[in-house]
Image (cartoon, coloured by chain):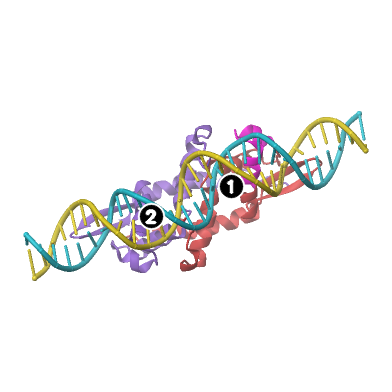
Chain colours: A purple, B red, C yellow, D cyan
Amino acid sequence: MGVTKSEIFTAEQNQISSIAKVFGHPARVAILQHLFKIDSCICGDLVDEIGLAQPTISQHLKELKKIGLIKGNIEGTSICYCIDKENWTHMKTTLAAFLDQDLEETNDCC
Amino acid sequence: MGVTKSEIFTAEQNQISSIAKVFGHPARVAILQHLFKIDSCICGDLVDEIGLAQPTISQHLKELKKIGLIKGNIEGTSICYCIDKENWTHMKTTLAAFLDQDLEETNDCC
DNA sequence: CTCTTTCATCGTAATATTGCAATATAATAA
DNA sequence: TTATTATATTGCAATATTACGATGAAAGAG
């Protein structure tokens, strides 16, 4: 099968897992870290920075763009990518609702 | 190829993506939410709660256990799973270092 | 002991992901 | 115009993931 049964889960559960899925590859983590570090927009230096082929980086960038975490501006022949900070903040709020569940209840078991 | 080139990334990048990968499926998100909600340990009610077959749930539990986010105690014929709160807290610290990058610098571009 | 219950594991089919070579596209340079 | 540069897309091979039926293993009930 290999296909996730999204229908049986809540919108929130699917949203959380979609975000997490994007973070679920070290190349995408590395890209985001680099974009934060350079913070003035960079382009395809990512191909040199990360050690993957250009089409592979392009594919990872596409997934990051699809979920809205980065945006790209055309600058001559090259494209300038950077973090979409508004969406980044929004994403953190969504994730926090899931990650901070332990703050609500304090019972311990096992 | 389908195989991730982990060697070319830092330990931190691989660690973050490993955690995120586990959260990258709605069933595992649902399992964790349920374990937090019930919070007294539950067992294979998860199979009824989530709408997936028992072997599938068992497989998801295995991945959650592998990364240390849950632990299981044998109780008669059934097994009692619950959140490993210490590891959960530790996981949050690791993720926060990645998610809170935007707090450090404030430049905006694009 | 046998039967039942509960969960894990095995095997397998369907699908998804990763990575890259080849190629296409788009903009600038000459 | 053609050439170059930068990025995207296509196509494909290798591998990973998801899901589940069948089966196995372990514990309690009878």
Q: Nearer the viewer, residue D18 or D22?
A: D22
Q: Main secondary structure of the magenta part?
A: helix
Across and down, in percent, residue A82 comes to 31, 57
Q: Is residue A45 above or below residue B46?
A: below
Q: Residue sitting at 60 percent across and 47 percent down?
A: A102
- Three-letter code for the amino acid on which mark 1 is drawn: Leu
- Three-letter code for the amino acid on which mark 2 is drawn: His
Q: Residues within 10 Å of mark 2 (few under 14, many from 20)?
A: some
Q: Is residue B58 above or below residue A50?
A: above
| First to last magenta residue range | B45-61
Residue located beneath label 2 in the image? A60
Q: Nearer the viewer, residue B98 or C2?
A: C2
Say which element carries label 1. Answer: helix
Across and down, in percent, residue B102 comes to 39, 58
Q: Which mark is residue A103?
A: 1
Q: Is residue B5 left or right of residue A88?
A: right
Q: Is residue A49 left or right of residue B44?
A: left
Chain of the residue displaying label 1 = A
**Residue A33: in magenta span:** no
Q: Is residue C28 left or right of residue A41?
A: left
Q: Residue sitting at 54 percent across and 55 percent down?
A: B19
Chain of the residue displaying label 2 = A
Q: Is residue B108 visible?
A: no
